[in-house]
Amino acid sequence: MTIFSTIGDIVSSGVPIGCLYALVAVSFNILYRPTKVFNFAQGDMVMVGAMTAATLLGFKWAPWPIAVLLAMLLVGALCLVEEQIAVRPVLERAGNTWVITTLAVALIIDNVVGKIWGADPLIVPAPFALSTEPISVLGLQISPYQLALIVLTFVLVGAAEALYSTRTGKAIKAIAEHRDAALLRGIDPVFVNRCSFFVGGCFAALTGYLASPLIYASTAMASGLLLKGFAAAAVGGVGSSRGALAAGLVIGIAEATGAELLSGGYQQAVVLAVALALLLARPAGLFGQAQTRIV
Amino acid sequence: MAELKKTPESASFKVQAPAFPTMIVAMLVLAILAAPLFSRSSFILYLATQAGIYMIVALGLNFITGYAGQISVGHGALVAIGAYALAIAETSGGLSFWSGAVIAMAAASGIGALMALPALRLSNWYFALITLFFAQVVSDLLGEMTWLTGGFTGIAGIPAPSLFGHALGDSEMYALIVGTVVIAGALLRNLIHSRLGRAMVAARDNPLAAAASGISLVRVKMIAFVISAMLAGLAGALFAAQKTVISTDDFGVDFSIFFLLIIVVGGEGRLLGPIVGTLIFFLVPELLGALETWRVLVYGVALLALMLFAPHGVVGAIEDRWRRRPRVGRPSQGVSLVRADGASLEVGGLKKGFGGVIALDSVNLDIPAGSVHGLVGPNGSGKTTLLNMISGFYPIDAGSVRLGHVDLAGRWAHQVARLGVGRTFQTPKLLGQMSVLDNVLLGGYPGERANLIDVALRLPRGRREAARLRDIAMHLLDFVGLADRAGDRAGALPHGQQRLAEIARTLLSRPRLLLLDEPAAGLSMRELDTLGALIRAISALGTTILIVEHHLELIADVCQSVTVLNRGRILFVGTPAEAFAHPEVVEVYLGRASGARV
């Protein structure tokens, strides 16, 4: 019985949190697909989304959908500013300069947001007044909100997959493969990059809002979500939405297992070890394709 | 070597590259480093000691990040591992500082290597994120594993290093650290100017050129990382010995970011960058103290602004202003180009598909050793794909590729290169920031035998080999007609000359088979003539040559036989004259209504 209840605890805490990591990974992928830039400030974008939504909800003058929409627009705009200042000027430079510039943006946002909101976490109620109290479902202790989050994650990942298999989605991928050729076919890479940053920012803010009822909205959430979202994206295969979902769940379960069997302080170590082992076995990730066109 | 021009001067050939008055700078640095010894203030000595320790970390970080292009955001964690390893070895293990320092270096590089191995096989940015993750995990574990690290109280009573029973005092400790900085700097400088340094820059700026030159990217990056991590571990040991008490407070997450900022300020990929960067940080104390609560914000803004406006930092800005064209001598006469051992190439039933599109279907080639073979066909017929499969850049779906008796299928590009397959690219892949001579020297990588110790300590074996290789490289540049541009930046050469330099690079490894991908594209009429003569001269040295080319006159001029590809299949094999007279070949080239002229 105990072993089953342990496994049950791991699943019921690991799967919902794994869904959050999958969503962060999808938001990474949205930016990555056309630009091949992996935004180091993405964890902060998620955090700013969560904090903004929490603050707007706290004022109680707008229903939650409006507050969430405003937070998404704000973070989308913030991503656009980042693209303008820190990404486009260095995109063509050799040596992945963008690693350092987006890292710098992360440091700046982290510090400024810390000054505005302070370190105290904000409590955010779940939408539709869903309960975050666990109930027993098929022997698992899981809350209605967690169930809803799992379903929504599958819907969002499915939508992302569907979008990227359309003509527009393929055009976005074409830019990553060959910017000049895409330009010749009437696709404007700069415009597509901007759109992707905006949409990626909106998605990050939504993820932040969805995460808040489970892990509170706080400035501390940025680095954890950055690293575990990265682990999910890399293990799943960068650019692949279904890979992000599968790997997000793997990472979430690994983390819950670490917390259950060892202690909270070992969670991140377990996640890193699992991610490194999987990357050693499959460098391109679970659903990634080895790069074919080189020369 | 009848084709080779005889060089008039016999003066022994030497590259002098005083891009900056090195002696003056070295004396200046030594003077600055020695100054605190004469200061009366123990606080200044303390700060200077700390600065020296940071310089050791920054020198190592610049090695992996500035030169090998792998951005580490986790060097602070490696320092922490070194510091705790020393503290535990000394306080619990009762070992001396010196044994403890060796353990610290082993711990930092060993644990670091475990973390880095998966990352180094992937794109550069994975490494940055994994090191950031690593820094976070190390910080977690230091707090969690209290039985080992003492948690927040830390480890106290770390004894100072002692020499022959005499415990080192403050100024002796400082002298030890300055000595370490100077020695580490000198060793790194030697490595940077060696085959390893060239390979690191190639891995950073042009991985394809590196692989084509026989360089294993993972191996080179790993060597660079381990050296860098050893320095971080050593700095950690010195850090612990200087402070005598260490705790988790000493190693916050922004500790790693701080080192990254030091090298960006000083100049990434510049020898003196880490030294200058650290000095700036300690001479501008506001950045460290007064703005405490805004420190991370200042770091962020500074990183962003520097990357945008001064990507090579302070040292880069000064050096670029001072840069003079290095003088390069003529090759000495004692050396002549050695014949290559040409090998036959047999390709059988080769297939390649890209997601449903068949790029190559049952392609066969049979090229005898020492011959020159042309591969022609319209755009998209699969010529470059075939070259990429022979040279190991694309995996083979089905079929065989044999070089002499050696099976090439399933090998990595750098392994194929090491077996004797040289190649050039449609657009020349040179390292634009390096000199033309250094670019050619890159091609010598697989043949060099000097090990890390030989080059780091400049032992005679390594120096002799390097001098001999430079001599051959100069001969090769003379051979392709670029001897007087040897000292120029490769990026500054016109297109046609870049192509010739790339060919010279492949020749340094004496390839058994040379693959040329559209060598004539974009050449002027005069350069075309030179190219034709050059190909014949290379062939006379024994190398087997396969040329992909649209310029049919060149093919007719130099090739004994040609293969015509069309839509991934072989259309015709024969002599150039037969091929270009064949009606089907004419048709695919000129279309059905063949009113056009060749």
Image (cartoon, grey):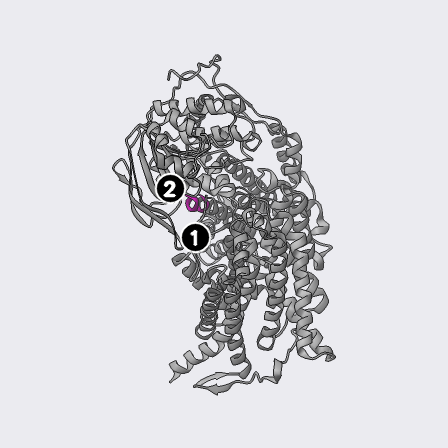
In x, y percent, where is residue B484?
53, 21
Figure check: A35 above or below B585: below
Residue that lies at the very extreme toward the left in this rendered image: B405
Say what amino acid the circle numbered 1 marks.
Leu
Query: Which residue lies under the disc numbered 2?
Result: B566
Task: Judge depth for marks 1 and 2 and give the one in front.
Answer: 2
Task: Describe residue A63's horizontal placement relative to residue A193 as left or right.
Answer: right
In x, y percent, where is residue B417?
37, 38
Q: Residues within 10 Å of mark 1 (few under 14, many from 20)?
A: some
The answer to which image quadrant residue A277 occupies is bottom left
Mark found first going from the N terminus, 1 or 2: 1
Query: Which residue lies under the disc numbered 1?
Result: B117
Residue that lies at the very extreme toward the bottom in this rendered image: A136
Q: Chain of mark 1?
A: B
Say what amino acid the circle numbered 2 marks.
Asn
The answer to which image quadrant residue B33 occupies is top right
- Give the structural element (helix, strand or loop) at label 1: helix
In x, y percent, where is residue B419?
33, 37
**Of the pair A90 and B201, the residue shown nearer to us:** A90
Figure check: B277 above or below A86: above
Q: Magenta segment, which residues?
A: B213-222
Res. B511 in view = no
